[in-house]
Image (tube, rainbow, N blue to C red):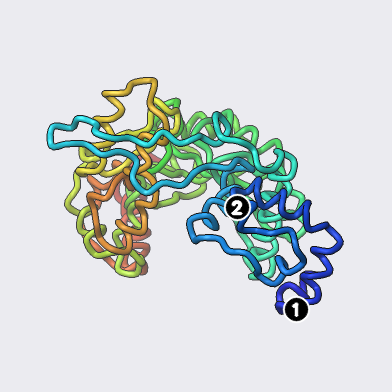
Amino acid sequence: MRQGLTKSKNLVSVRILQTVGTQKTQDWAVRFGFPAERTPPYLTMALGAGSVTPWQMMRGYAVFANGGYRIEPYLVKEIRDEAGNVLARVDPPVAGETAERAIDERKARERELKAEKEYIAAIREGGVKVVETAGRSPEAYMPALKAAGIKVIHKCTAVRHALKAERIGCDAVSVDGFECGGHPGEDDVPNFILLPRAAEELKIPFIASGGMADGRSLVAAMAMGAEGMNMGTRFIATKEAPVHEKVKQAIVAASELDTRLVMRPLRNTERVLNNAGVERLLAKERALGDKITFEDIIAEVGGVYPRVMKDGDLDAGAWSCGMVAGLIHDIPTVKELIDRIVAEAQQIVRERLAGMV
């Protein structure tokens, strides 16, 4: 069946439709938002009979992206005048809250798991040996990854999360302190506390993340129990990084005081570099308080990264940056950066720390 559909064999499509039933197929099309009068219940449906608009196609595919809920797409969230007063506003149904289900939760999850299996297959077939996971527990993927001989490092912002990762079989963890760019969690524990606590509790190796930039970072991280360090913001400001030059220059120009924490009321805290888009987001958080939703800030967080990283539109919205920007003063090659970090670390150990032995 898959081969037939892939090769666009019409007879295969017609036989599938015949087996499922034309009326049942039309009923399902309606559930996905396609009008019944434009999708007549005939076998010619399999050949593209009927008509739909690009907007309706987008609405139909959005069901899969929204966990089985049918949402209504929109282009403009709200219109404000020069004084900031809202003149018009869209209040669409929200997936999981007010939106209607098109497919049940089990079927939606089946599709999600299928996509995840395809990702793991691509990782395995691509010869990847180490995978870093983040955001939620990788427990469901561990058997497949382990069977393929792939090492798993899980990103954690709290010791309790790191211990869970250890229990489910992760080979190592990346411990992210409050200084990090992106999502630092909700506990606000900086690395000078978090790393030693991880060393006290964990049996598996861990890597220090957040605030890491140079040889001093490496020596300090290893002194607190880490096996090494992980860098994000520092690597963005390198010659090879595939981002717009304006992004690199913005990081070099920034200080440790130029980041902001956004989405705290939503318990999805993210550390970002301050800009006009971030100021708009923070103004919305102050105005709406605990009533704020993701829909309210979609203009500042949705689809922002291509505009920033590819187009160099630094004020498009919120983009991750760590406090370590204050320690970044140049844009070297990756090799120059790594060589410098190792040389600095060795010098610190030989000259500053040797006398303590």
Q: Which disc number belongs to residue 200?
A: none
Depicted 65 relative to depicted 15: above or below: above
Where residue 323 sits in the image (x, y, percent)?
A: 29, 41
Q: Nearer the viewer, mark 2 or mark 1?
A: 2
Which residue is identified by label 2? 34
- Residue at horizontal 65%, vertical 48%? 30
**Looking at the picture, which amino acid does disc 1 mark?**
Lys
Q: Is residue 317 above or below residue 41?
A: above
Does any portion of residue 315 appear in the rendered image?
yes
Q: 19 left or right of 167? A: right
Query: Which tag, 2 or 1, sits closer to the chain's start?
Result: 1
Q: Tell me the crowding category of disc 2: few under 14, some 14 to 19, or many 20 or more residues within 10 angstroms, Cα based.
A: many
The furthest residue to the front: 37
Q: Which residue appears at 31% of the width and 56% of the height?
A: 344
Q: Relative to 16, is 322 on the left or the right?
A: left
The percent position of residue 324, horizontal first and vertical second, equals 29, 45
Position of the C terminus, as image quadrant, is top left
Residue 269: quarter of image: top left
Residue 271 locus on image (x, y percent): 34, 39
Estimate the x, y position of residue 250 in percent, counting from the top left. 21, 54
For the residue pair 193 and 346, the one nearer the viewer reads as 193
Q: Is residue 211 above or below residue 5?
A: above
Q: Which residue is mark 1?
A: 9
